[in-house]
Amino acid sequence: MKYIFICYLWALLAVPVYGQSSVSGVHLIPEPASMVIKNGSHIVDENTVIRYTDGISKKNAVQLQEYLFKNYGLNLKLLSRRTEKSDRGISFVSSKAKGKESYTFKADPSVIEISGDDTGMFYGLQTLFQLIKVKGQKLEVPCLEIMDKPRYAYRGIMQDVGYHIYPVSFIKSQIEMLAKYKMNVYHWHLTEDHGWRIEIKKYPKLTSVGAYRASTQISNYVDSLNGDDHLAYGGFYTQEEIKEIVAFAAERHVTVIPEIELPGHSLAALAAYPELACGDHPGPFKVAERWGIFEDVYCAGKENTFKFLEDVLTEVMELFPSPYIHIGGDECPKERWKKCKHCQKRIKDNHLKDEFELQSYFVKRIEKFVNSKGRKIIGWDEILEGGLAPNATVMSWRTIDEGIKAAKQGHDVVMSPLSHVYFDFIQGKRELEPLAIGWGYNPLSRVYGYDPTPTVLSEKEKQHIIGVEAAIWTEHMDTYRKVEYMLYPRLMALAEIAWTFPEKKDSVSFFEQRLPKHLAELDKTDKIYRVPSPIGVSDTTLIGADFNLDLKVSVEGAKIYYNFEGQDARETDFLYEKPIRIILNKGERRALKSIVITPSGRRSVNTTTIFKNP
């Protein structure tokens, strides 16, 4: 007896039908809340005019004008709708009736109209950018009607620069990509044991001393490499550079949230100002050179600790207008506090039970100061320990259960569980991927399949899940190119789970239709990204006698090459042009190696699929 296997593995993730956008040839990421496709298209040419209704809508109109000139050489006229009776062209209309960040997009053969508040119009503009297609000598936009709004208010990534620092130009490129995919938060982790990356004018040694380490660990965990590189490393962002980045982000409706770690992960600060540590004569300390958690932390019993942090946070809040200030709060050892007379006196004087309640005291005191400046704190889920500060928002990272716990206590929660959205985790076989943290596996499909709102919460409790964030920790990302590899295309999957309502998500259209289009556009840039493997195979073993493999490229315009020789596939091998038939007699085994090579020459890792007929 023979068995026919259709090896179509993405179907494991699929919903029954393609999304409307894929059927129509429209390939938006993230998928809108509502979209109706109509017949025909709107032609954008030199006769098109761009209109606006007020100063807010004019900003978006100007952005479109500049985009069309830069990318297509079209220099279109900009007009107030009050000056012309005809509505032909592209119009931006200010309206707050649709809700914050919401927009409507209407395109027919004569008019494109984008309406919403300032941010909503901006997101409608991003949709327009994705819809514009070159057809011969013309630009076309399909006729359709979209009513769109985000699922979550908070949609972001966390970029760590404490372990490794990156150029201002790269930070801006990340922010541009966030905006393109309707993400609105850039959480910037600026201080760490391994480097202090923000200029604080009142405490210059934070950067002259704390921003530099003498050596850097090459690897850790289960990786084969060990030891240090014995090379000095460091750097920081000046306040002028930070102002430039914050303004750049604001223009794109991205909020930059700074993180100043406390009470732990503070060794770089202690290297600069050792008097902030526990004991009467602490130190000397040096900026951490090896990865891990360090027992030397800010002293919770000294008043000068809080004076220092208040001074630092004052300068930070002057640079960052964000409603939230992230204060870290994670992985703070208590050993120094247990032996410190100042900390023990603080515990006794404030009738605290233990060092966990001392950490709660620390966080609550910082929160009170931040609140006095009109801001709110957000911190990693360890801030729940010992009793949470009353107005704090929790970033749940250790487990999903920590977010559930915080929501049940009535606290707002941003879900960032390492189990699903840690982008420093590998995406494939470890031996084929760039060096990464020694545990954890978050492939693109796992990110896309994540629902940030736990089903165990009541409807009222679910309202406290305000968003989702992916973390990019950089112990092993010593170049910005590696950061890009770890970020793209997982960012696209993150954008869809952050913006799109679950009933509108469609994994088949995402992986087979929309993402290949977007990766084809990314392939034309200088950005590094992880090329997904051929759609239809995976690193697995399949049992049977007769197999028919129907494969698809993961990047539009790419090619699939394969062989059965046991060597890694390359362009000298078979070019996939039609389904592959594999017939096995009893006891036979065959190994298929396959690879995707994109138009730019970028390559996926090799996929090895084993076929056996026992």
Image (spheres, rainbow, N blue to C red):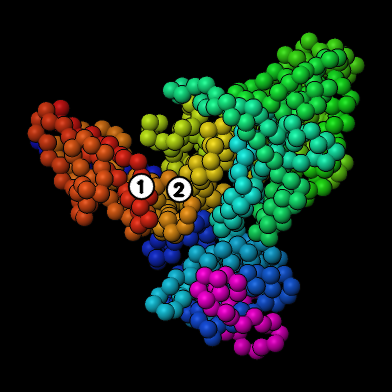
The three-letter amino acid code for the residue at tag 1 is Arg
Q: Which residue is at a point 74% across and 73% down the rendered structure image?
A: 55
Nearest the eye: 99 or 178: 178
Q: Position of residue 285 (x, y in %)?
A: 73, 21
Q: Residue furthest bottom?
A: 85
Q: Which residue is at a point 15% across and 27% down the rendered structure image?
A: 614
Q: Where is mark 1, residue-wise? A: 603
Answer few, some or many: residues within 10 Å of disc 2's Cα (few below 14, many 20 plus, some between 14 and 19). Answer: many
Q: Callout 1: helix, strand or loop?
A: loop
Nearest the eye: 609 or 546: 609
The answer to whether one can see residue 491 in this image is: yes
**44 relative to 494, above or below:** below
Span colored in magenta: 65-92
Q: Which residue is at a point 76% across and 25% down the rendered structure image?
A: 270
Identify the image quadrant of residue 302: top right
**61 relative to 184, above or below:** below
The mark total stands at 2
Q: Position of residue 362 (x, y in %)?
A: 81, 26
Q: Which image quarter is the N terminus in?
A: top left
Q: Callout 2: helix, strand or loop?
A: loop
For the residues bearing labels 1 and 2, Cβ distance under 8 angstroms: no
Of the numbered discs 1 and 2, the one sitting upstream in the chain is 2
Q: Where is mark 2, residue-wise? A: 529
Q: CA distance from mark 1 to mark 2?
A: 10 Å
Relative horizontal placement of residue 468, taking residue 359 as reference (left or right): left
Nearest the eye: 424 or 127: 424
**37 relative to 489, above or below:** below
The answer to whether one can see residue 503 in this image is: no
Q: Position of residue 296 (x, y in %)?
A: 73, 19
